[in-house]
Every structure is written in C-alpha cells, then in structure tokens.
Amino acid sequence: MRLALSEAGRAGTDVPVGAVVLASDGTTVLGAGHNEREASGDPTAHAEVLAIRRAAADLGEWRLAGCTLVVTLEPCTMCAGAIVQSRLDRVVYGARDEKAGAAGSLWDVIRDRRLNHRPEVIEGVLAEDCARLLTGFFRGR
C-alpha cells in the first residue's frame, strides 16, 4: 500500500489515488498508475485502469490471474468492471468510498455472485493514511 500511496502523490492536480499491480510473488510491480483524468482529458484514466493496462502490457497478456491490485481508494464501478474482466485474483484497498465505491460500500460489483470471476477483496489497509491524503486534497480545493 505504501507503493500505491507514493504513486498517488504523483497525481498533480488530479484526485490523489494511486494503484499498483503486483505479480503472484507479491513483491514484483507489474504496473502502476495514478489518476490522470485532468492531465490527459481521459475520463477513463483512473489509477486502477492505468495500472491494469500497464501490467497487461508488461505480461503481454490481458489475463492477470495470480496478480493483486493494491489501490488507495475503493474502486468505482468502471474500475470494478476492469478488475473483474482482467481476472485479477485479489484487490486490496485503503479508504472506503461511500459515494462511489463498488467493492462493498455503495455497490459490490467485484464480488457479485452473478459474475464468472470474483476476486478476493481486502479492505482498510492503511485506510487512515489513504483517507488523509484525499481529505487534504479536497480541503485544499
């Protein structure tokens, strides 16, 4: 999670969310990303989507079986869909997102029993540090 927090710090004027995809060994970073919507003008440039894209490119494979996504904020519905489609084994997140979270807060897309793939979800890792980063950003706005 500390790697994801460091990545979030690179978000510049965007909401400071960071993500990393770890290989099955749990230590090798296959892809990393931070929110880039403002910088790129791309509404899909969420930290999770960028980290997933980069990990898939690194592996040369869209299936990220055995991999773990670590992200500072609970994924939204778009990112939850990308997580399920990429076949990640697990998602670890820090702060809950009561307004748009899709991994247990508002929705639970990631673990929806109707889907053919349901990654494990671990929440609340360094939650206070992750929330503090976001709170500071929004207070500054």
Image (cartoon, rainbow, N blue to C red):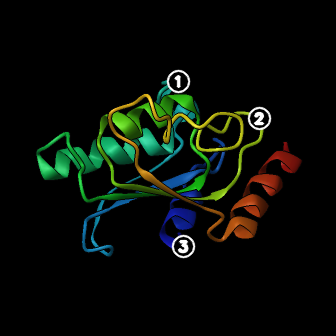
Q: Is residue 128 visible?
A: yes
Q: Is residue 108 left or right of residue 58?
A: right
Q: Nearer the viewer, residue 14 or 54?
A: 54
| Relative to 13, residue 10 above or below | below
Residue at 71%, 69% (x, y): give it: 129
Q: Secondary structure at mark 2?
A: loop
Instruction: Report crowding for label 1: few under 14, some 14 to 19, many 20 or more residues within 10 A (C-alpha).
Output: few
Disc 3 from disc 1: Cα separation: 25 Å
Question: Which amino acid, mark 1?
Answer: Pro
The residue at which mark 2 appears reads as 99
Q: Is residue 45 visible?
A: no
- Residue 2 disc label: 3
Q: Nearer the viewer, mark 2 or mark 1?
A: 2
Disc 3 from disc 2: Cα separation: 24 Å
Q: Nearer the viewer, residue 2 or 105?
A: 105
Relative image position of residue 59 (x, y in whole percent): 14, 52
Q: Of callouts 3 and 2, which one flags the residue occurring earlier in the amino acid sequence?
A: 3
Question: Which amino acid, mark 2?
Answer: Lys
Residue at 39%, 30% (x, y): give it: 115
Q: Nearer the viewer, residue 51 or 61?
A: 61
Image quadrant assignment for residue 27: bottom left
Residue at 55%, 30% (x, y): give it: 77
Q: Nearer the viewer, mark 3 or mark 2?
A: 2
The residue at which mark 1 appears reads as 43
Q: Of callouts 2 and 1, which one flags the residue occurring earlier in the amino acid sequence?
A: 1
Q: Quadrant of the C terminus?
A: top right
Question: Which amino acid, mark 3?
Answer: Arg
Label total for image: 3
Q: Is residue 106 left or right of residue 86?
A: right
Disc 2 from disc 1: Cα separation: 18 Å
